[in-house]
Image: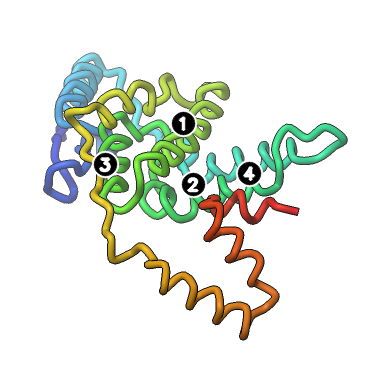
Amino acid sequence: MGVRVRQKIKGKGNPWWVFISHNGKRMSRRVGTKKAAEEAAGQIEAQITLGTLNLDKPKPKPTFGEYSQKWLKLIESQCKGNEPRYKLSTLEEYEAILRLHVLPALKDYEINNINKARVRDHLISKLNNLSKRRVESVMSVMSSVFELALDDDIIDVNPTSKVSKRLFSKNGYKKKPIDKTEIFTPDELNLLLETCERHFPEYYLFFLTASRTGMRLGELLALQ
């Protein structure tokens, strides 16, 4: 019998758990930080002392992955009708952001167990490979999913709130230097366009427009 606090996987940034053994029943719950886990353990020990602890398994909260799909369906419903609020291209962009930059790391976490620290650490990891603007888009999509859960009383606070002030502060964010080897020289760009015109004429105007305007992919795909 007793209550213990530890990490299942030791290491900075990994969640802390509370392990309970009482009256022949065992249960473990992921809490988040060590401080929060210790506070939860103290409350549970008090319930054991008072005889009020009930270890009947509570209904699990939805995962972030499940709630993100609910949010996407809501956006999809607003792409229809005579005066749609969103374009289908916007829905596709949101889906791609979740699929590529959020769900691989967070889809299996119960949405109420994702705290500010985890959101911040995830976004910081994305700054290693994505531009600041793209990471801001990732955070915006995450925030929208959390806002829906907040409206449904699944969570008490949106963990993305005020994260950007620390994440993108002048002292906390260093702009990734441009790798000049990734930029076409005039000769390389002309060779690309000539090759495209000769072998892939159906895509020539697309790449010509991209090279002359600097438009983003989403803007190019939306052209009619």
Q: Image check: 216 left or right of 35?
A: right
Residue 20 seen in render:
no
Q: Position of residue 219 (x, y in %)?
A: 61, 49
| Separation of marks 3 and 2 at Cα, in angstroms | 20 Å
Q: Residue at x 46, y 37 (%)?
A: 142
- Which three-letter amino acid code belongs to the residue tagged 2? Gly
User: What residue is disc 1 on?
Assistant: 143
From the image, state whether disc 2 or disc 4 is nearer to you: 4
Q: Dot 4: few (<14), some (14–19), or many (≥20) neighbours within 10 Å? A: some
> Mark 2 highlights which residue?
65
Identify the element where label 4 is drawn: helix
Cα separation between marks 2 and 4: 19 Å
Mark nearest the camera among 3 and 1 is 3
Amino acid at dot 1: Ser
Position above or below: 56 against 52? below
In this figure, what is the number of numbered marks? 4
**Quick one: label 2 or label 1, which is nearer the N terminus?**
2
Dividing the image into 4 quarters, which one contains the N terminus? top left
CB-based contact (under 8 Å), mark 1 and mark 4:
no
Q: Which residue is mark 3?
A: 124
Q: Position of residue 39 (x, y in %)?
A: 18, 21
Q: Label 3 sits on what residue type? A: Ile
Calculate the distance from the C-alpha at mark 2 to the C-alpha at mark 1: 14 Å
* Position of residue 162 in the picture relative to residue 220 (left or right): left
Above or below: residue 171 compared with residue 210: above
